[in-house]
Amino acid sequence: MIRIVHYLNQFFGGVGGEDRAGTGPVSKPGPVGTGRGLDRLLEDDERIVGTVICGDNYMAERGDAAVDEVIDRIAEFEPHIVVAGPGFGSGRYGLACGAVCKAVADRLGIPAVTGLHADSPGAAEYRASVPILSTAETAAGMGAALQGFARLIAKLGRGRRLGTAQEEGTLTKGFRRNTFETARGSTRAIEMLLAKMRGERYETEWPLPRYGRAEPAEPIVESKPFRLALVTEAGIVPDGNPDRLPSGWATQWYAYPIHDRDGFAEGEFESVHGGIDTSFANLDPDRQVPLDAARSLEEQGRFTLHGDLLSTTGNMGTLRNMTRIGTEMGRSLMADGVHAVIVGST
Amino acid sequence: MGAEGSVNVSPGPVRQVLDIGAFQVNEVKEGSATELTDGVLTIDIDALEEILSDDPNFAAVSVNIVRPGDPVRVINAIDAVEPRIKVDPVGADFSGLLTGPRPVGSGATYALKGVSVVETAHPVPGEPRYWREAIFDMAGPAARYSPFSELINVVVSCEPTRSLLESGDRPTNVFEGTPEAVEYNRSVRLAGLKAARYLASTTLGQTPDRVDTFDLAPSPTRDLPPVVYLYQLAIPFLHGEIAPGAGAIGGAAHLPTPIHPNELLDGALVCGWNAIACMRELTYTVQNHAIIEDLYARHGKDLDFRGVVLFTNGDTRAAKERLANHASNLAIMMGAEGALINYAGGGHPAVDAMMICRNLERRGVATTMLSMEMAANPGESGFVHFVPEADAIVSTGNYEETVLFEPVERVIGGERLIKIEDDPAGAFEAPLAVVLASTHQFGHTRIRGEEY
């Protein structure tokens, strides 16, 4: 028998709505909520042996620690395969589904699959590492998603490899590779243009990147005291680059203390950015990160300045890495009570 | 011709019609005389080498014949040229370079098909070499990436003089070389053009296997969708000069210009700069311009080809806007309801090409772009720049993808590669960027990028 464990959030697991989003992980035998529908579509030798449910906020706020708790509970059911969601277009739930699936594969060494909308944050974060069934944006697509899950379980649960994203209805990894077409590029371009002019269906060979929209925060109210942080992607580091921040393709960021400085002196900090002429920044790093100006405004009582400069290199940064770095920096700053940030760009 | 003193009245508007007489070449061999007989091109190598050696920048010139399937690697390639000769009017070969500037693009031209002249030359000290590596294999796994592995190539290898090799100057930037290096490169290019004309002269007095007629005559069928091709140039020579004030090297961008496609097919535009090999605007790829050929093939059948607009790129935002607005205006003036736009490659040009796409789409002209991709790492989009209006793009391939070169028996074009430190005859990995015409922006090849 193929043993399946299902991961759900508090809503689809029947615990409650947003008011119960802080609920920690719980285990239940057999299918629950969404899982009952899925169970009816499974083959005779496939069974949902258990369900692990966790609140969206619990997962979002506790990160890896919460994922570890969920994985421990999943492991207790001794599954052959794990299914998470579907999370559709949701933010926190989709990210949790992706994180659980990735951890199942990494830690338990068994297949795991989720279902998300192509534009959801979870899809952006996990499409390269987790098989994700392409779903509708809302739970209106539940029926199709569960049928897709049943199809993928039948393959993955028996140790079969998945076919191409198009064949399986899954999201692509988002990677590019070269292939050979039967017609040359110029011929294909004319076909595409004529289809477009006739109002017929055509498919671009190179989809534009999807950038998630970051909603701007409410303006800060200057009458109240607030805390300002300086952040840069200009690769500003202490002289000698002690952490070896790369000049491009960065995957890390670093916090450097600036609480005891009124500005950057030449020779004490430098820019390691590999995509700009850094000579002006090296002559006076304040022209890249305005510490001197920020300090003088602080002295006028306008705000308090956060004690660290958060720095990475934006040059050649992949969208995936930069999204993660931005999220990590944001979490760190919020945990430190920062209200506002100036990000100097190159 | 009208009688002397009388007015020559033509029945209707004057048209620019070009007949290209194609002579299919199935074999190229060395012999005691240069001639074309029943599809076999025989070359008097000594005579050709002597003609080409007559240049003060060369110590020597050697000519080699390489065929598809030969275990040969050609390195340090500069340009590739299809052998051509003008037969009507005579003497207008490679306007501005082998002759003074001449009107070309009409009358008749003879061409050797299935064969190409490729010049190779090792860089001299004053030459920028950042983008100079250009390789293709005639056999093995890397061969399929270059269209030149499918042709019989007459490789003209130019050796610089000792004084050029000993000149110590370093290039001032990645585009320009020292005056000596610029002249040396010009000599290498001229050698290729001369060889092309010399080989094509074997066709004189013979009947072509096929005549391709290029005629932009208004379509007798009405209501065909009117299409204009917006051709972004890197830095080629148009009638012997850098055309038209190409942004990156020529300073300020000149205004885009409409041009008859026949002029481009007929030798007015030749390779003028050693751009990245995968996207280099080789004379061969302009003579056999894939987009123009394919538009002509469908002209009067399912589209109405209205002509070409040449554009380059601006160096400032204002220059780019000026250029993009003007190029869009020209296309609309020519009646475009649809437009093909190719992106020449590089950083700046991506912005100008995308601005034109946006302008035209916003004014109701449907666009399709041809673009190469630059994704060096998994998860990178590969775009330099894009606008949301660019919703129809044909990918001509990701040039950052690594290609495996396997050992070959023979290398032509020098003893060493430029940036690749491995043995040129051995096995090495390199990005597709170094393979000649691999991801060519005219859609010359069948390579494309796909998502997985």
Image (cartoon, grey):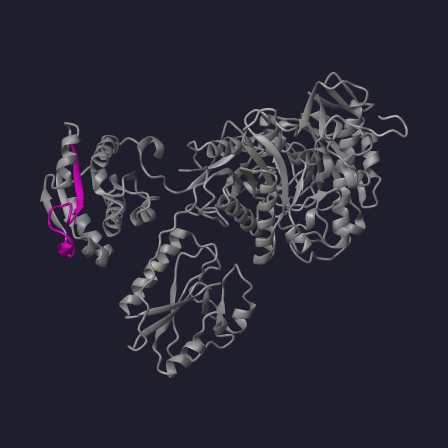
Q: Is residue A73 left or right of residue B108?
A: left
Q: Is residue A214 one of those drawn in magenta?
A: no
Viewport quadrant of the N terminus of chain B: top right
Camera-nearest residue between A292 and B286: B286
Q: Is residue A305 left or right of residue B137?
A: left
The segment highlighted magenta reads A1-24
| Residue at the left extreme, as displayed | A29
Camera-nearest residue between A171 and B385: B385
Q: Place residue A113 in its image quadrant.
A: top left
Q: Is residue B280 visible?
A: yes
Viewport quadrant of the C terminus of chain B: top left
Q: Is residue A165 left or right of residue B294?
A: left
Q: Place residue B25 in its image quadrant.
A: top right
Q: Is residue A2 one of those drawn in magenta?
A: yes
Residue B270 position within the rendered picture, expressed as x and y whole percent measured from the top left:
71, 39
Residue B310 position within the rendered picture, expressed as x and y whole percent measured from the top left:
64, 43
The number of numbered badges drawn on the structure is: 0
Q: Is residue A164 visible?
A: no
Residue at x 13% of width, y 43% of height? A51
Residue at x 31% of width, y 67% of height? A333
Residue at x 15% of width, y 57% of height? A22
- Figure check: B385 above or below B266: below
- Figure check: B207 above or below B149: above
- Figure check: B245 above or below B106: below
| Residue at the top extreme, as displayed | B38
Q: Place residue A252 in its image quadrant.
A: bottom left
Residue A192 position within the rendered picture, expressed as x and y whole percent measured from the top left:
49, 33
Residue A287 position within the rendered picture, expressed as x and y whole percent measured from the top left:
50, 72
Camera-nearest residue between A185 and B5: B5
Camera-nearest residue between B42 and A98: A98
